Amino acid sequence: MPDETKGYIRLSEPASYTAKVTVKKGEELSVLSVCPKIISNISAIAVIYPNPTVGMITIEVETTGVYIVTLAEMTGRVLTRKTMTGQTAQVDVSGYPAGIYLLTIDDGKRKNTTRIVKN
């Protein structure tokens, strides 16, 4: 049996999620509680994680297409805008001060915004 097991759960509905993971290693038993909203789902356009973050934000989409990804301050001032054409993209927020930012994903039909917390 391996010492380490990694799991991945894809959340597809906008909601608050809580998970409990129990790990047994040797004689030690520990419980890890996963905080709700670690992963944000923007109306099934994309899965965004981690949130909160200290550096890179990963954006995953199920359908390859052209997406405009915009990061802005809460005032609306645009900090960065990029075109996403694959199924995964990253946005680096490490150069910005701690605070709350707005990440918008636009697929040409839907435009959804979520708050990103930068620690």
Image (spheres, helix red, strand yellow):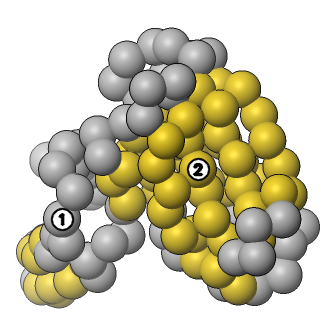
Residue at mark 2? 104
Asked whether the beta carbons under mark 1 and mark 2 sit within 8 Å of each other, the answer is no
- Side of 53 where 16 appears, left or right: left
Label 2 amino acid? Answer: Thr
Q: Which mark lies nearer to you, 1 or 2?
A: 2
Q: Secondary structure at mark 2?
A: strand
Q: Which residue is mark 1?
A: 15
Query: For this rendering, which residue is in front, 107 or 96?
Result: 107
- Counting from the top left corner in percent of width and height, residue 98 is at 75, 85
Of callouts 1 and 2, the N-terminal one: 1
Q: Position of residue 108 (x, y in %)?
A: 52, 24
> What is the x, y in percent for residue 77?
84, 65
Residue 76 falls in image quadrant = bottom right
Above or below 51: residue 28: below
The C terminus: image quadrant: bottom right
The residue located at (26%, 77%) in the rendering is: 36
Q: Nearer the viewer, residue 13 or 35?
A: 13
- For image coordinates 51% across by 27% down, the residue present is 107
Calculate the distance from the C-alpha at mark 1 to the C-alpha at mark 2.
Answer: 18 Å
Name the amino acid, label 1: Ala
Q: x%, y% of residue 68? A: 65, 32
Q: Is residue 52 left or right of residue 71?
A: left
The answer to whether residue 53 is seen in the rendering is no
Q: Is residue 119 left or right of residue 30?
A: right
Mark 1 nearby-residue class (10 Å; few <14, some 14–19, many ≥20): few
Numbered circle sitting on residue 27: none
**Going 32% across and 72% down the picture, which residue do you hit?**
37
Q: Secondary structure at mark 1?
A: loop
> Which residue is pictured at 53% across the width and 70% down the height?
115
Local crowd at mark 2 within 10 Å, few (<14), some, or many (≥20)? Answer: some
